[in-house]
Structures are given as C-alpha cells and as structure tokens.
Amino acid sequence: MERLHAVDALRALALLGILSVNIWYFAFPENLAGGGRSAGLGETGSGGGAGAFAAADQWVAFAATAIFEGKSYVIFSFLFGLAFVLQWSSAHRAGVSEVSRSQRRFAGLVVLGLLHGIFLFVGDILLAYAVLGFALLGLRRISTRAALLLAAGLWTVVALALLGLGALTWWLESAPMLEGAAMTEGAGMSPEAMESSGLIMATEEARAAYTGSLGSYLAFQLEAYALVAPSMLLVQGPIAFAAFLLGLVIGRARMIEQILAGEIATTRLVSVMLPALAVGGGLSVTAAWMVWGGEPGAGGLGAETLSAGLIFLAGPVQATGYVLAVLLILRHRGFSWLVRLLAPAGRMSLSNYLGQSLVLALIFSALGAPLGLGLAGQLSASQVGGVIVGLWLGQLGISHLWLRFFDRGPMEAPLRAWTYAAKPLHVKPTQDHPSA
C-alpha cells in the first residue's frame, strides 16, 4: 500500500502543536505542582516585568491556548486510530494476526511511555495510548454507528463534567462566605499577601527541585508523575479514545484516500470545515481569553477550570476543521513542495515527540548536568515561543537528514523490530557501495 505522505505532513504539523502546548510545563514546572496554567507568567525572565513586553508574553500564551491546546493531541489520537486500520490491513496481507502484532506494539509503547513519563515529561501520552490501544483492539469490529455514538458520548461527558466543575468552583470562589477576605481576616494576613506568599513558595520550590541536582529532579518527576498520570487516563484519555474511534471509522471507509484523490467535492468538505473552525475557534478564543485576557491568574481556579472545559469542548470540533483544511491544501499540486518539506518529520513522529522532551528537559531542567541549562522560569513567554519555532524547524531539518541514510527513525526502528520481529535498522545503500 502506498504511503500517504500528506498524512505524514499532517502529523508533522500536529507535532508543532504538541510542542507548543507541552513546552510550558518544562519552562514553568510549577504548572505541574498545582500552580495552574498561568503560574509564573509575567514574573520571570528578562522580559517578565510590566509593560509592552509582558503584554506580548500574554499574547503568545493566548495564541498557544487558542490555536493548539486541546487540538493537537486530538489530531495525533485520530491519526493513531487511522494507523491502527493500516497496520491491521498490513497484518492481513502478511497472513499474521493483527491481535498479536498490536499487543506487541502496545506493550512496547507501555515501556516507552513509562520511561518518558518518569524521566522526561510527566505529561506523557504514550502510556495512555497503549492502554487505550488495547481497548481499541477489543472494539476493532465495532459498527460505524456504535463507534460514532461512543465517541460523541465520551467527548460530551468529559467536556460537560469539566464545565460543571469549573462553574461550581467559580461560584464557590465568588460566594461571600468563601471570599478571601472572610477566610483570612482572622489570620492577620491580607488575601493579596497570602496569595502572593503561596504562589511564590510553590513556584520557588518547583523550580528549585526541577533545576537542582539530578536527585531532586527525579524526585520532582516521580511526585508530579503520580499526580498527572491518572488525569491523563481519566480526563484526556476518553477524548483520545473518541479520536481513536473516529480514526478507526475514517480509516475503514478510506475517506482520507478519497479526500486526497479529489473524490469528495471541495464544496462538501468546506461546508464541514468552515463551521468546525468557526465554532471550535470561537470556544477556544473564549477559553484563552478567560485565562490570558486580563492579569494572569486573576480569574482563579474556577476560571481556569471553566476554560479547560471549553478547550475540551472545542478540541475535536476545531481539530476536524484543521484536518480538513490541511488535507484540502496538501492535495493541491501547487503544495506538493510543502508535503515534501513536512512529511519526513511526520514519518519520524515518535522519535520527534520523544526528542522534543529530551531537548526541552536539557534546556529547562538540570537533566544531564553539567549539560543541562536549568532555564526553567528564566525565559519570558515570548522567548519560549522562539524556542518552539527553533526546535520544530530543527526537527524538520534533522528528519530530512536522517531519512537520507535510514529507512526509519531511531525510535520507530526498534519499535517496529519488536512489533514485527524484523531487523531493527536498515541502512540505505549508497551509490559508492550499492551492495551495502
């Protein structure tokens, strides 16, 4: 079966989105210690003071939330479900069981996910993918109608639960009996002083542990991973599984191939794409404004939880618009150069995903000391945005270079070897040595 290079290109763009979301947890590790998404913004780095530069920082964070947060991992999850169908077809053509191959692949992802989560990034998604992959394997023959109903149900339940929790939290925060003044008046400390003291202590402790010795870094990782991993399965997991199911349905119907071949009318695709972008984008912009529209953190936990609920509600809708828009662009002959530019990074998506975490950990933590730079909390949001662009462009270039010499990425090769019991890495023959 011919490889869908446009899908690889789409996967490369999703990598940019994932990087744009994950990097904030490296740059501001207090976000993993309960500080909230706005923790630390505007108080760190050379550009962290008030004024125009601080406003620019907020706009960078606003863009990351509105454009990428809750959307990129949905696209990645959709592509995982789509790849499941392609791998299943490959197993059938080879005359082997898709069950045994899938089980080996998911077992490999469990190991990679645990190592990634503990040592590099506690927000790892690979472990959740592996666990949910076993569930997808059990439902591989689910009907299209049942798959779509289950996906819609999972998405609705998670989004409404977060919206309800956020609304309740916001109401409790605004209730007179729970106002900061009433809660702290007897303690002899103003609400502002208590909030400031708590935030600074949490921030300093998190950054000190993250950028300290290797031992303190690992201790921070283990503690944060124990807190974050369950939420990855219970909150993001259902949305990811809903995207798996959609990818399964789309893959079985071969709709991606039909779109790329021009067999589905552009007007029909646009009639879905534009409302999805409008509705999803409107919800995402509202969610971003709730967190970044004023003073960072001013809305409190209720506003951030409500914002997260809106992000989860918008994610699959906006992601659908993104996917259709990208496929419409990439199927045009005039953009074949863009497919060639992006596809190698998508072919190495596992290596690039793990590579992002390794590079970010080296930049922001003490990992690999004395090589680790320990810049957590030292860069402004605008500077973090520069790291995003530089790292992603670097991965595009490295992916092209790597695939000139090897068939697969450095992490794809051993995972495939484990899954297919094949030779781990095949070096391409060169013109000087055609028999190599």
Image (spheres, grey):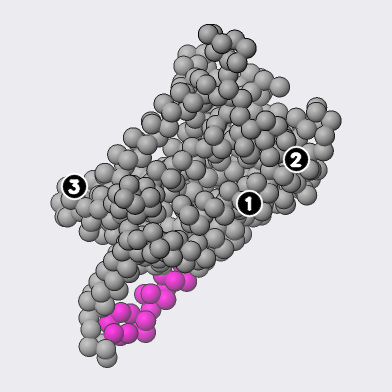
Seen at 51% across and 54% down, the residue is: 117
- Mark 1 or 3: the one toward you: 1
Q: Position of residue 147 (x, y in %)?
A: 73, 46
- Give the labeled residue for mark 3: 53
What is the span of residues highlighted in magenta in the rendered image? 166-184
Seen at 52% across and 13% down, the residue is: 333
Q: Is residue 175 a member of the stretch shown in magenta?
A: yes
Decide which of 367, 147 is in the foreground and name it.
367
Residue 101, disc: 2
Horizontal side of 400 relative to 181 (left or right) equals: right
Q: Position of residue 199 (x, y in %)?
A: 29, 69
- Which circle's residue, 1 or 3, is located before the other in the chain? 3
Q: Is residue 413 above or below residue 401?
A: below
Decide which of 106, 8 is in the foreground and name it.
106
Q: Amino acid at mark 3?
A: Phe
Decide which of 51, 90 is in the foreground and name it.
90
Q: Amino acid at mark 2?
A: Arg
Considering the numbered disc 1 on the image, is that residue within a helix, a strand or a loop? Answer: helix
Q: Quadrant of residue 182?
A: bottom left
Look at the magenta stretch and give its main secondary structure: helix
Determine the CA span between mark 3 and mark 2.
52 Å
- Give the labeled residue for mark 1: 110
- Which circle's residue, 3 or 2, is located before the other in the chain? 3
Considering the numbered disc 2 on the image, is that residue within a helix, a strand or a loop? Answer: helix
